[in-house]
Amino acid sequence: MRQRELDALMKGLEKLTRTQRQRLVAELSVGERKAASVEVIERSLGDTPCCPHCAAERVVKNGSADGLQRYKCRACRRTFNALTGSPLAGLHMRGKWLDQAAVLRDGLSLTQAMERLNVSRPTAFRWRHRFLALPKGVRAQALIGIAEGDETFFLRSSKGQRHGMNRAPRKRGGKAEKRGLSSEQVPVLVARDRSGSTADFILDADDSDHIVAALTPILAKDAIFCSDGSKAMAAAARKMKIAHRPVNLSAGIRVIAGVYHVQNVNAYDSRLKDWLRRFKGVATQYLDSYLGWYRAIDRTPGGSLNPASLLAMAVRV
């Protein structure tokens, strides 16, 4: 806008009614938040963007669209922007994206998200799982030193599904029909070292083979593995040929030699389940998203997780 046009606009503000001024302020606020979101998105691309279509680095700027810089690849001749190929591509209302990231930081329910963002339930649901599509894959790539492992279980849930259930519906957050472990429970392996690096895995079966498949890529060969002494964990440690320190909790033993215990991983499990209670049951098909969501929160305790960091993580990790 030219200076002359801006001066004319500023003079016209005096003629606005109070309602019109409030509407103008709201529109300007949305514009500012959209610009802030775009800045985070653009920054996630880095100084040397590469083509998401062919991975070539020979790209040039090619105008802009909807506030985002566009690029053209010299190799494949296709165009792209910072959102191309990301889970957020195609979503609208970028002015609310940082607010959506804040919703994730605060662990709000769908109803609370709808009210804060002023969006419909389908939009709140779609945004939640699009924003979590990449973070759910961010977990520790290596556990070193003393590592602790524990199996925790979540009630199998078909929440949100109207068809295909082989049982009668139950209330959200309900209990299993059978006591103890059964096919109604989904096993999740949580592993954590003393530095706080955490990885969790949804297992198809609670046995040593599946535990080995999950832990072998991330557990250092010289690590000392602590568990609660379950047979599956002990068998997995033998197969991986790593040092194992089982803690017999049923016998009242909590710590061995003053250092070997599973208190860190058990505390993590407790915090995770306590955090999940607010959702009154999590659909099994989305359990990995919620596990990744909590890992992101737990990595920055005290509620200090920056919405801008969450937005950037939702675009590119």
Image: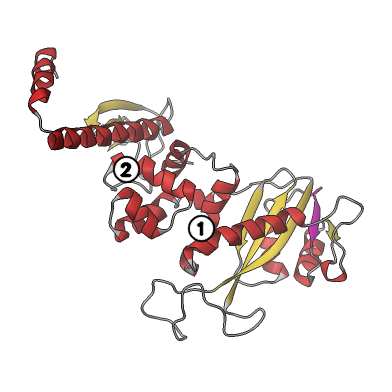
Residue 254 percent location from the top left of the image: 84, 60
**Given the current orientation, which residue lies at the most extreme right position?**
257
What residue is drawn where x is 73% and y is 58%? 149
Horizontal side of residue 226 vs 297, given as left or right: right
Q: Are marks 2 and 1 in contact (CB under 8 Å)?
A: no
Q: Secondary structure at mark 1?
A: helix
Name which residue lies at 49% across and 37% down: 306
Q: Where's residue 1, x and y in %?
A: 14, 20
Residue designated by label 1:
290
Q: Mark 2 highlights which residue? A: 96
Magenta-span inclusion, residue 80: no
Q: Which residues are magenta?
A: 221-227
- Residue 53 visible at all: no
> Is disc 1 surrounded by few (<14), some (14 to 19) or many (20+) residues within 10 Å?
many
Question: In the structure shown, which secondary structural element does the residue marked by tag 2 occupy?
Answer: helix
The local crowd at label 2, few if under 14, some if 14 to 19, many if 20 or more residues have their Cα within 10 Å, is some
Question: Is 265 left, or right, of 305 in this rendering?
Answer: right
- Left or right placement of residue 84 versus residue 280 in this view: left
